[in-house]
Amino acid sequence: MHTMVDKHADAVVHAKVAVGLPTPKVSAKDVNVYYGEKRALQDVSVDIPDRGVMAFIGPSGCGKSTFLRCINRMNDTIPICRVTGKITIDDRDIYDPKLDVVQLRARVGMVFQKPNPFPKSIYENVAYGPRIHGLSHSKADLDEIVQSSLEKAGLWNEVKDRLNDSGTGMSGGQQQRLCIARAIAVNPEVILMDEPCSALDPIATARIEELIEQLRKNFCIIIVTHSMQQAARVSQRTAFFHLGSLVEEGVTTEIFTNPKDKRTQDYITGRFG
Amino acid sequence: MTDISASYAAPTRRVDVTSPAAQARIRARYRREKRFKLYGLVALSLAAVFVVVLIGDVLSRGLPAFWQYSLVLDVPVDAAAVSSDGKVDEASIRAADYYPLTRAALEAVFPGELTRSAQKQLVRLVSSDAAQPLRDKLVADPALVGTTVKTRLILSANSDLYYKGSGTPISSREMRGIATPSGTSGDITILTSANDFADVLVELKQRISEQAKALRAEADRLELFAGDSITAKVKALRDEAAKLQQRVDQPKVEEKLDNKMPSLLVAIDGGLVKINTLSDVSARGTVLLPLQSTADAKPGTWKLVTYETPESNRKVSDQEVAFLERLKELNHVERSFNWTFLTAGDSREPELAGIRGALVGTALTLLITLVLCLPIGVMAAIYLEEFARKGRLTDLIEVNINNLAAVPSIVFGLLGLAVFLNFFGMPRSAPLVGGITLGLLVLPTIIIAARAALKAVPPSIKEAALGVGASHQQAIFHHVLPLAMPGIMTGTIIGMAHALGETAPLLMIGMIAFIVDVPHGFTDAATVLPVQIYLWSDLPEVAFKSKTAAAIIVLLMFLFVMNGAAIWLRKRFERRW
């Protein structure tokens, strides 16, 4: 219950700050994505504020995951995918050819739909990112990063005695929290979550949502979800996508109580989707 | 919305599970499933039977070759025989001629006068390099020179085979009369007081009668065909049959024995006499083992011995059988593990031939193949699968890799001959060239297997690595490659097993040569196991038949060890995801 109260309080704060969003963390302008000849996203423009949760909702195939994957240039791995328009993080164009995509992904972490821990130990899963980015200088340093990441992900107490066990031997919910710990171990500025709870049961989902609630104080979180209840519970701002275009974007309570667009209203009331 | 409500309307067609037609359908389905299971079971048991037959056959033929009979004799080692310029050192021991020593030791076992031919046959019982163990002993301990050394002598292949059971059944019967031999050596006559030989003579005549009958039958059979040459042949057969019949018809007349009949021998006074001419009361023959005296032999102390297999049908003569049987009686024969087979190189003489050369050659060749193929194959697979821009060029390369995997292996041999030997001038018959040539053969297999293994790694693992900021290369080498490793290992082992069994390309680059020395390096002349098997299977000596089977066993063991190593490696690398 207390989360509901919190959320309302935060929403009010955000509503004040977000007027015109003077300092957006992530900003997209006229983003178009093509898969070969097919246009998957049409002229998407949105500002995403720092600190807080932004939810992308919409029916399947509407382009919300595609847009999410544009933010850390994950779409680069798909050979036929082409992105036009401009996406900036802290006013820096992330599609600038001079920008190093690996550096970008260190700043923009990602959690995937299906928990995908590395088939290594729990410790190694979390330590991998800091190690390749040179964030630690000693074993003790690394141990500390691993511990604090697991603590932030709410997993430390469950796994502290079996850090050398396989990361794939845990339950689905634990695996997903391990993936979140792995993402936050490199201390990113933005965390992208692509339907992080779709493969989990309601109890594990609740734990992840609690975790998101904690994390939003320190990170800019963007979450794609199919569940409107989840969007309403965890996010402060919501964007509704439909057929490849951004239909409506705004404060979550506004979107859910007073949608401006007919399509948004139809979707949130369950007319389609 | 209206479609949804329509789909709830009562269906007009429903499966009637109780109808006879439905029951029949169910029975038919069960029958089909049962039949399918049966096919599988039959196929599986057929395959199992074939495997068992194959392995059983190879084992039954090859295992005897791992055991070897040898003579154990006391050999007096005369210092003069193993010295050069009056000095005895390792070189002189190695260079010495041991033939006189072995000959003397053998003759000491058979006291008395031997004919020249018997002496020759006695020496031929042992291998041409019979004193090899003695030489090794002397080299290890030169203090033995001048003493009498108890040592093994390697038997010749024929003697070895005789002890392994390819000789003749031997029977003997005791005689009733008192026998008097006329001498101790050479051709002698044995007279007996009773008509001991009468029964034997009757049996002999019976056998001759059977032979005559067989000849007549053969003549009758041939008569059915016309032709001058056949007519002549029929006449010859009939004449021979008539001659034999004549012998049979004169019961009391003495009989000559030939090598087409079982051999009859008389064991008397510590010697052995082979009967040439037989009558009721006397036998004339040749002494095979000298008699100790010409004393009269009392009833029961002398025997008639029969070697059932006619001499012409055996590898060993009566004289040799006599020697070998006597050596066995005197406990000079020993059966031991045939280390020579595992430690020696190839040889023209079966008892000295070993597979060490081929084994080392195989190991060196496969090492070259592995060192060449695994890195290149895996790198090529990674590049093609993960980094290369997909396009017409990569398609072309992929098609060609698949084609190369199907090219007949002899073509690679020709390529090796033309390029490595003729153009680059690499050494002939060398494991280096063999390894590179086999490498060409194996490379496509490894690339295809490695690509499949890389493709089988879930993309989510790569995405996870990219998501935490690993570069493409880091994601591949830290996460994808380790997960693909078991598959790559399996593919590599299949490729290496393929290379292990390959003969054709190696023939082209000269690895079929007869090579006695064990290779010491990658450029020494060498041969490999399958080629060695092929070479041995072609040789006429009977003893090489079991060597061939034994070499096949070794090849299979090599394969098992290789596969075992692969499975162990795979288990080590294998992780769930």
Image (cartoon, coloured by chain):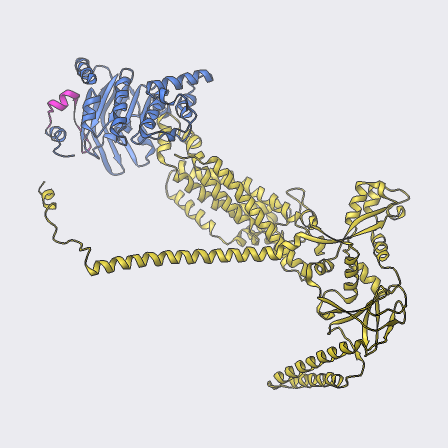
Chain colours: A blue, B yellow
Residue A251 highlighted magenta (yes or no):
yes
Where is residue A170 drawn, in percent x and y? Answer: 36, 29
Q: Is B412 on the left or on the right of B388, as rendered?
A: right
Quadrant hosting residue A155: top left
Observer-nearest of A262 and B564: B564
Residue B454 visible in this rendered orientation of the protein: yes
Q: Give the residue at x 10% y 44%.
A: B3
Q: Is A88 on the left or on the right of B513, as rendered?
A: left
In this view, B291 is above or below B278: above
In this view, B79 is above or below B549: above
Q: How many marks?
A: 0
Q: Which residues are magenta?
A: A243-261
Residue B437 visible in this rendered orientation of the protein: no
Observer-nearest of B99 and A94: B99
In this view, B302 is above or below B214: above
In this view, B50 is above or below B468: below
Where is residue B553 drawn, in percent x and y? Answer: 59, 52
Where is residue A168 drawn, in percent x and y? Answer: 38, 31
Q: Is A161 on the left or on the right of B165, as rendered?
A: left
Residue A10 highlighted magenta (yes or no):
no
